Every structure is written in structure tokens, then in C-alpha cells.
Image (tube, rainbow, N blue to C red):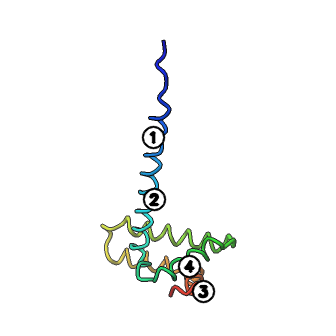
Amino acid sequence: MRKPRDFDAELKSLEDKARDLKSRKVQQLGELVISTGADALSADELAGALIVLAETKDAGKREAWAKRGAAFFRGRSRRTASASDRDAGGVATQSGDAQSVSSGASTS
């Protein structure tokens, strides 16, 4: 005879996993804010900039931001690279589109 499933235990386990995932997401977002230097912004400035980003429908701008973000993470993963390599990567990430949005959202 089969053992009956303990739905309460399964539900609790799923709730624990969901809580852990949410906690990890919040921690990672905080780390991202700090690593990008956005922690120097006020909470109002950061929230305003994020709202502008979330409301933007222009695919070109979103793609430019995505490329800049990817370049940022590639640069971080090359911590062992020489300083000249990092400097060259930093220049490549200076996109005009991303800067115009940040200045438009009062974040510069």
C-alpha cells in the first residue's frame, strides 16, 4: 500500500524555497546596486531611475543597456586581467544611450 503524501510538509518546503529564493534575489540586487556605485544615489533617485528603466519600451535603448550591463559583468569576471585590459573594457562600456537615460532620470 502507498504511503499518503504529506501535502502540508510539501507546501511548507515549497514556501521555504520561495522565501530563500526571494531573500537571495534581494541580496543580489543589493550587491548589484553597491557594485555599480548606485549606492551613492539617494533612494528617491535610484527608485526614479529604475521606474524610468522599467517603463521604457524602446527596444534600442533596452538593448544598449543590456550590452552595457553585459560588458560590466564581463569586466568584473576578469579581475585577474591586467589594468590596461580593464581600462580598455571600461571605455567600451561608455554608451551614450545609457548615460542619457541616467541623466534624464536625475541620477548623474
Determine the image quadrant of residue 76.
Answer: bottom left
Numbered marks: total: 4
Q: Which residue is mark 4?
A: 49
Q: Nearer the viewer, residue 45 or 107?
A: 45
For marks 1 and 3 on the same chain, the one whose residue lies earlier in the sequence = 1
- Verify CB contact (< 8 Å) between mark 1 and mark 3: no
Q: Nearer the viewer, mark 4 or mark 1?
A: 1
Q: How would you rate the neighbour count of disc 2 (Cα within 10 Å): few for under 14, some for 14-19, many for 20 or more? A: few
- Secondary structure beneath dot 3 equals helix
| Amino acid type, residue under disc 2 in the picture | Lys
Disc ID at residue 12: 1
Disc ID at residue 104: 3
| Amino acid type, residue under disc 1 in the picture | Lys
Q: Nearer the viewer, mark 2 or mark 1?
A: 1
Q: Nearer the viewer, residue 77 or 38?
A: 38
Q: CA distance from mark 4 to mark 1?
A: 37 Å
Q: CA distance from mark 1 to mark 3?
A: 45 Å
For marks 4 and 1 on the same chain, the one whose residue lies earlier in the sequence = 1
For marks 3 and 2 on the same chain, the one whose residue lies earlier in the sequence = 2
Residue at 39% x, 79% y is 87
